[in-house]
Every structure is written in C-alpha cells, then in structure tokens.
Image: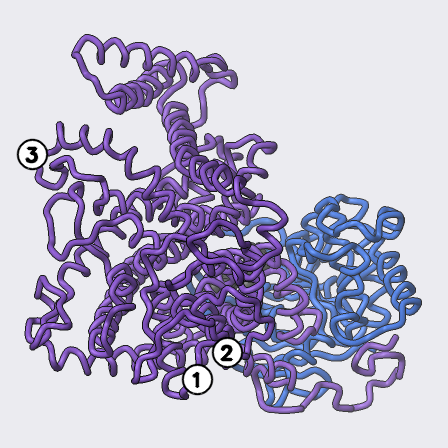
Chain colours: A blue, B purple
Amino acid sequence: MAKRIDVSGLTAYYGSHKAIEDISMTVEPRSVTAFIGPSGCGKSTFLRTLNRMHEVTAGGRVEGKVLLDDEDLYGTGIDPVSVRREVGMVFQRPNPFPTMSIFDNVAAGLRLNGSYKKSELNDIVERSLKGANLWNEVKDRLNKPGSGLSGGQQQRLCIARAIAVEPNVLLMDEPCSALDPISTLAIEDLIGELKERFTIVIVTHNMQQAARVSDRTAFFNLAAVGQPGKLIEIDDTERIFSNPSVQATEDYISGRFG
Amino acid sequence: MGTSTQITDASPPAPQQTVDKRAARGATRPGDRIFLGLSRGSGILLLVIMAAIAAFLTYRASLAISKDEGNFLTTFQWDTNAVPPVFGIAVLAFGTVVSSIIAMVIAVPIAVAIALFLTHYAPRRLSGPIAYVIDLLAAVPSIVYGLWGALILVPHMNGLFGWLNDYLGWTGIFSWQGGPARSMLTVGILLAIMILPIITNVSREVFRQVPQMHEEAALALGATRWEVIRMAVIPFGRSGIISASMLGLGRALGETMAVATVLSPTFDIQASLLDPGGGTFAQNIASKFGEASVFGQDALIASGLVLFVITLLVNGAARAIIARRKEYSGPTHEHRNHHPKGPSTLRGARLPKWSPYGIAAGSIAVAIGIGLAAGLHSRVQWGLIAAILYVVGTYAIAAAVEGKRQAKDRVATSFVWVAFLLAVIPLASLVWSTVARGVKVLDVYFLTHSMGVVADTEPGGGIYHAILGTLEQVGLATLIAAPIGVLTAIYLVEYGRGNLSKAITFFVDVMTGIPSIVAGLFILSLMLIFEMQPFGFAGSLALAILMMPVVVRSTEEMLKLVPNELREASLALGVPKWRTILKVVLPTSIGGITTGIMLSIARIAGETAPVLLLVWGNPLINPNPFEGRRPRCRCTSTSSGRTARAPVRRTTAPGRRRSP
Ligand SMILES: Nc1ncnc2c1ncn2[C@@H]1O[C@H](COP(=O)(O)OP(=O)(O)OP(=O)(O)O)[C@@H](O)[C@H]1O
Ligand SMILES: [Mg+2]
C-alpha cells in the first residue's frame, strides 16, 4: 500500500557543508517520480533524507519536514528503524552481504526483522527474485554466495532484497547504472508493476529512462560549485520533457548544459 | 505478506500510525539500548581497570618514593635494603627505551615486508603454511624465546659484534670489549624477533582486507606491483600497521622473561650497546621481586609506574603523529604524485625471467672477489657487500632496460624477499631447536603425568599438570577478555564518538604496554587486600587484563574494514543497528576477529610472569580453579602474609620448579 510523501523546507548538511537547501515537493502514492540533475547537485542526498539514511553518515543533519501520509519522519519519537522498514532503498553500487548466500540475501530483511516459516520464506524469496528478473539465473544456486554473481545480477539481487520486505515506498539511486539493456528493461517493467502497489522514487542520469518510467520528474541543480543543490522544478514528465517552465531544465534536457 | 508492520492490502491508507513512536529520537529500541549499554559498559570497564591499576601503582609507589634517599629519577643504584634506601630508575628507563627502539626499528619494516610478502608476493602454496607457522610463533612462550636467545642467539652474535666493533667501534655505541653478547643490542634483536610474528599477523590481516576495487583501480592506471602497494595497500592499511606496531611495542616494553634470561644486568648506563649490562623495568622487577622486602616491592612497583607513564607518553606521541597525518592518508590522495605516465609501447622492454638470479649470482661472485682482494675475513661483510651490489645492480640494470618505475618495483620485490628470508633464519632456528630438544623428552608418559612424585633433581615426571593448568587458565581468561574486548571494539567503531571513545582508545593502547608482571602485581595486591590465597582464577584475571587490549585493538581494526555500504544496506532494510552489527558486520569480519582473539590467546598462553606470581605453579593437579592451589612445600609465607619466591632465573617449564 503506497503512501504519499510530502516534503517541505528540507535542508541537509554534511557537517557544516550545506548539500541541499529548502526543498519542497509532493510525491503521489502509486506513482513513479524521477530525479534528474547534474552530478553533485544533491539527488542522492535528498533521496537518503527520505528514509533517514542521511543521518547515518558522520555529520549528516537534516532540517525541515518529510511527511509520510501526514506523519513527520523527523518528528519527535519517530524510530528511524521503522521508517526504513517502510521506505526501502536500492543503492547505486550493488552491495549484497558477502557472508550470505543468494537466498539469505533476499531473505535478510525478513529474517533480521523477525522469524518466518521456511515455506513462507521460500515463497517470498522466489517471488522477489522473479520480480527482479533474476530467478531463472540463480534458481539452481540459491545457496551460493551472493558476491559470486555478476555486477548486474548483484544489483537485481539487491532489488529483490529490497522488495522482499514489501516497503510502502521504494527509493532507487541509479539502480540501472550497472545493468545491461535487457535487465534495465526488466527493471523498468518491474517499476511499472511495482507502482501499482508502491510509491517509487528513482534517481537517474538516463533521460530516456526518466521519460519511460516516470509519471513526474524533478529537476535539481546547483548555482555553482560549493553551493547547495536546489529543486528547480517538478512537474508531469511529459511537460518537463516537452515544455518545461524553467529555461535551465530545458537546457539540461536538451544537452545544452554548462 | 507479513512483515513487521501492517503493509498488506487495505487500499485506502487510513491515517494510522505505522511508524513506531516508541521513544525519543536516535538509537532507542530496547535491543539497541541494551546493546549500546553493554558495549559502552565494556569500554568503561576497561577505563576503570586502567584507573585502578594506575591508582594501585601510584599508591604503592608513593610509599616507596617518599623514603628514597637518592633522586628517584636520576640515581644509578638500586639498593632498597640499604639504610636509608637508595634507588632510581635512570638505568631502567634508558635500557627499556633503547631496547624497545632497537626492536621496533628492526621489527616493523621487516614485519610489514613479510605481511606484504604473504599477501602480494609469495606463491599461494607457500603463503598459507608460512602464515600458519607465523601464527604459531606468536604463541611461543616468551621464556622459550629467552632460552633460545641465551643458548643460540648470544653465541651467534659474536661475529656481528666483532664486525660492528671493527668498523663502527669509533662511534662508541658499537664498541665491544669482547664480553659475552648478553647486551642491550642482543636484547633488542631478541625482542624484535619476538614481536615480529604479532606485527606480521595483524598487518597481514589488514592487507588481506584491502578491497579488490582499490587495487584494481591502481592496476588500471598502469601501476606496477610496488605502485599498487604504495597507492592502495599501504595507505589503506596505515592505521592497521600502526595498531600492529603499538601491540608489538607494548610487548617489547613490558617483556620480562626473555630479557631476564638473555641480559646480564648491571646497574649502570653504558654508551656501548654491545657490552653486556644495563637493565629494563620488567626484567628488574622480575629478578628482584622474589627476594624483595615489602618496601623493596613498593620500590619495584614505583618503577612499574614509570614504565606505565612511559607507555602513556609513547602512545600519546604516536597518536599525535597519526592525527597530524590523518588528513593526508587514505588511498585517494596519493594518486596525484604517482600518476604513471602511460608506456609508449604496449610491449615494453622486459628483463628475462632469470635476471634476478643472474644478478644475485653476479653480485655474490663480485662480493667474494672484493672480499678476497681486500682481505676481509668476516662473512657478514661479504654478505653485506653482495646485498648492496645486488640492490644497486638490480636497480641500475632494470632502470636501463625497463625504466625507473620497473626498477623501483624490482628493488621493492627484492627487499620484500630479503626481509622474509632474513626473518626465516632466526624463526626457523627457534622452531627447530625447540622441537629438537623437546622431542627427546616428549612421550605419552610426559604428557599424561604430573610432576607430583618427582623431585627436580631427578629426571622423570610429566607436564600433564602444566597442560591442564594452561588450558584452564587460558580458557577462563579468554571467557572474560574476549567478550569484553569485542564489545569494547564494537563500541569504538560502531557507536563511539566524542571523548569517551577517545579516552578508551588511548588507554587501550596504554594497556597493551602494561608489563605482564605489573598486571600480576595488581591482581596480587587486590588479593592481599581481600586476604585471599593464591589460586588459579587470580592468574586468569591477570591474563585477562593482558588479553583485553589485544582483543580490542585487533577487533577494532577488523571492524573498521567492513565496508560502510553493507551497514547501509542492512539499515535501509529497516534492520535495527544492533542486529545489523550482530548479523552483518560481525559475520563479515569474523575471520579477522578470530585471528585477533587467537593472537591474544597466544600472547597469554606463553605468559609466565604473572602466573608464577599468583599461582606458584603447583605440580599436582587441581581441577578446581577457584580453590587455592597450595603446593606442598613451595612457598615460604612471611609473617606479613606475603609469599615470597624468586619468579625468575629458573629456566624449566612452568610447574617443573620446586624448592629444595
Ligand atoms: N559523505 C559525504 N560527506 C560530505 N559531503 C558529501 C558526502 N556525500 C556527498 N557530499 C556532498 O554533497 C553534495 C551532493 O552530493 P550527492 O551525492 O547527493 O550528489 P548527486 O546529485 O547524487 O550526484 P551524482 O549524480 O554524481 O550521484 C556534493 O557536493 C557532495 O560533495
Ligand atoms: Mg548520487
């Protein structure tokens, strides 16, 4: 069951360095929102504030509000661990747990959070691996280590791991940058399926991908190196790619940037 | 599907509170709080132990120093029975510092080279067994090193000493009057050989953890093997190398039995490192403690306090140096200087495969020629000339044919090999002499019988009691020290920020330098306060004190090597921090942590001094560690309730000693 994300006045720091400033946006439930923008403008940082992963980095600090269905993730008394169970994440670089088998990697989120019956786990693992388009490649070696897979396979394993816990929101930071075109397509199809149930936010450097998968697109930019990144505009993907309201967006999309 | 929160179907998202509101912000789940409490508690416990040891040392020391007639810091004399008593630590401080410096200067480069050899140079088939043997060597009791030093190293030093005297004698430092080589230099070399396995072990474990990625990044820039090591491996492992060195230094500063066995102590400072004489804190405490009066013991404890302070200062200095360099460490920064220029052709000129052997043969031949022509007698000299010729020759030839970078790589390779071969000689000799001598008496009877029925003067008896006692004490000490150590390391790496963790890190380093005999004294005095008899468990406590810092240090290094991405991956799944640590971080680093614990077990399994002090090596078997092991006729209880017995100068295995 998807949830709406409502961000208002969000600023994030690394120590004294302000990485992003005063970002406000709404992400509708059961939709895909793409973040685009030049490197270093704070897309990853912003994404990580949405499940309180930002504060995990040393010196990470956040001001502002992130409402998940009317509940402020940064409100007093909120447990970041519970937040992360509801807002899952796929990282840019595949990071399977090296000590665990493929099966255990997918089951990790479930196992580490509670106890499950073996048959139940089998079902979930199979469904998640199928969802991530990996099942056929690994079904005969579920007990082999996850680190023995190729880079693209590892990334799909990480996606399977993230969707296995059925989060409300799925954050993806350039999830396809390590994938071949077929797996990328599979992931994009998967995103299309997942958005029926989940809210999805995806960071991508691939304009076609943003255009293909997303309903809405947000463009981030920074005024100059060392300045904090800002949200320039967010709108329906079609409008952003055909008729954006800000000149900088058009420049970026059409490659006339810098 | 049933995850922890209700995320199943329920289409209209009712405004329900699914996000936990259990407590305030931060790490606040009960599991997290308990785990944090446990690990922080362990850290604090370490601080408390350190404070207690310091307080104990200071108190006893103050009793003695107040009556000292000489200047405690500058007097060259140790006579606590004189009226009024005169004693000072100048000689001991000098000897301790000098022998440790010699040991470090020799051991650290060679150990790092061996670690590199094992991880990056040695053929795979060779490196496994060698690493195993070096692990074992770390477990050899220091008394065995001492015996080996006295029986084998000392006689073999004469050649080197003569040579040093001939050529460097004019400096004064290396002059030699021809006495037995029971001198500071020999002690330094022996200490170097002793701490070599520890430093090698930890460094190797660290080098092994260097992410493939980093090395491949360097390789992809066209780096040679040596450049990969300089760009990726050493910067990545720097903190680990320093930790390893600190562990080694701690052991060198506090080593008792090996020094006491090899050195002929005198109470003066000599300019020459080759002439017998001098002394160290630990050696002095060990050799005088047995016969000392209560006052004499206090004086010795005062010297222990000074050692403690020296350890503190050395660690502080090391820490300051690291802190200044920190900004510039890390693999990324070094890239700038080494950006290798791309080779102009893909197939650069290469020396043939046999060239190292060729150059080696050539330089040996030339060296012999020079030696004969110049009439040099010492083979040490021939070897030295050959080595220099080899290095220079390799560099020159490789630089001419393959270019400077390849030449450096070849020199580095030969240094690593030479360091390895250099270390093999004494270590192999040690293993050989121990095994060869041991095998003669080793049989089933020896292993399964105690010394209970045999007098020292007669042959016979066995070491059953010693094996059982060692296992029991070491087992108990491990049960105490390993959990506390690992939890403390977890606190430092996973939670620690701010002053508490800084203090713990610092004092853990200092703690590695506590001589075993001081740990023994500390427990002994606690026992006296509570009027307890010596018993096995007390020995375990002392051993646990020695073990903890090693466990903390090595575990800390291993935890630091776990990539952050794994922690993040787990946290992003909504796994609480404590479970992330238990299920992801610890399993990933379990290999290294186990090595660390084995290393610390090795350190204490061979530890003699505190056990001698506390348990008095009962030759009978007593399976209950909590019951006093009163030997039948071993110790003479003085009226003050103190037991006095010389714990050193007996070179039999623990438990084989008995008073007449
Ligand atoms: N761990 C960190 N510590 C300090 N500063 C950081 C850290 N991570 C990112 N930054 C800084 O924050 C800013 C935003 O970085 P971020 O990674 O969010 O950019 P991004 O938009 O995701 O870039 P890319 O498209 O290259 O992934 C950058 O200026 C970066 O230097
Ligand atoms: Mg990014």
Q: Nearer the viewer, residue B16 or B364?
A: B364
Provide the secondary structure element on which disc 2 rests: loop
* Chain hosting mark 2: B
Provide the secondary structure element on which disc 3 rests: helix
Whether residues under marks 1 and 2 lie with C-beta atoms below 8 angstroms apart, the answer is: yes
Residue drawn where x is 81% and y is 45% of the image: A182
Rounded to the nearest whole Å, what is the CA distance between mark 2 and mark 3? 57 Å
* Chain hosting mark 3: B
Rounded to the nearest whole Å, what is the CA distance between mark 1 and mark 3? 56 Å
Residue drawn where x is 38% and y is 26% of the image: B405
Rounded to the nearest whole Å, what is the CA distance between mark 1 and mark 2? 9 Å
* Chain hosting mark 1: B
Residue designated by label 1: B532
Give x and y (percent) for residue B87.
Answer: 12, 69
Residue drawn where x is 50% and y is 68% of the image: B489
Amino acid carrying label 2: it is Gly
Q: Nearer the viewer, residue B341 or B127?
A: B127
Give x and y (percent) for residue A163.
Answer: 79, 66
Q: Is residue B175 above or below residue B500?
A: above
Q: Nearer the viewer, residue A254 or B624?
A: B624
The answer to whether residue B567 is left or right of residue B99 is right
In which quarter of the view is residue B283 placed? bottom left
Residue A41 in view of the camera: no
Q: Does mark 2 have its CB less than 8 Å from ligand 1?
A: no
| Mark positioned earlier in the residue sequence (1 or 2) | 1
Are there few (<14), some (14-19), or many (20+) residues within 10 Å of tag 3? few
Residue designated by label 3: B170
